[in-house]
Amino acid sequence: MDYDNIILIGMAAAGKSTVGKRLARELGWAFVDTDLLLEAWWGAPLQAISDHLGRDAFVRAEAEQIRRTFLKKCVIATGGSVVYSDEAMQHLETLGRVVYLESSFEDIADRLTNPCTRGLAIAPGQTIRDLYDERVPLYARYAQVRVRTDGQDPDQTCAAIIQALSGNTENPS
């Protein structure tokens, strides 16, 4: 790989952490979950941070955490709301290749079994569908590589990422 890091973006439950850990192991790189960095910085679980700050301040705190992050040879799983900050995304683009784990709403809804405890940056009254519809265009905007996850297990998704980043853009499925 001719870049320093692989940055995974996508909805909560798209598989960023699960796939990221496997991808890092496959490449012999480190794995970093920016949600865990945020928890470490604040000394609290993500949901408590989100509840305390509210959506807008949470998004700003997440962006600040991203902008303080400088890593090499890492697979980085980001929080799903990172795409709300153009500055955070520009910083991530300087760190490596941005890979969008693209999942259908149906797959996200099936996998997202605990939305009330995941620390989602969601506005009062907003549904998971609303959140999905709002974020998908942002993920697509910032994606340098897109990998579909529907119908694939984490190992297949990991292989598809490696294949896409190696120059073969076909998604093996």
Image: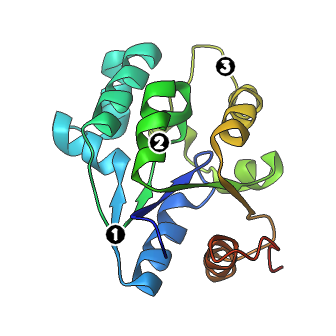
Q: CA–CA distance between discs 3 and 2?
A: 15 Å
Q: Give residue 118's mark.
A: 2
Q: Residues within 10 Å of mark 2 (few under 14, many from 20)?
A: some
Query: For the point 45% across and 48% down, which residue is it?
Result: 78
Residue type, mark 2 in image: Arg
Q: Nearer the viewer, residue 86 or 151?
A: 86
| Helix, strand or loop status at disc 2 | loop
Is residue 85 something one can see in this rendering? no
The quadrant in which residue 63 appears is: top left
In the displayed structure image, the side of residue 39 where residue 15 appears, left or right = right
Question: Which residue position is annotated with label 1?
Answer: 73
Q: Residues within 10 Å of mark 1 (few under 14, many from 20)?
A: some
In the rendered image, residue 51, in percent from the top left (x then y), is placed at 37, 22
Mark in the foreground, 3 or 1? 1
Is residue 134 something one can see in this rendering? yes
The quadrant in which residue 46 appears is: top left
In the rendered image, residue 33, in percent from the top left (x then y), is placed at 37, 55
In the displayed structure image, the side of residue 171 where residue 22 appears, left or right = left
Q: Is residue 125 above or below residue 61?
A: above
Question: Which residue position is annotated with label 3?
Answer: 126
In the rendered image, residue 4, in percent from the top left (x then y), is placed at 39, 64
Q: How many marks?
A: 3
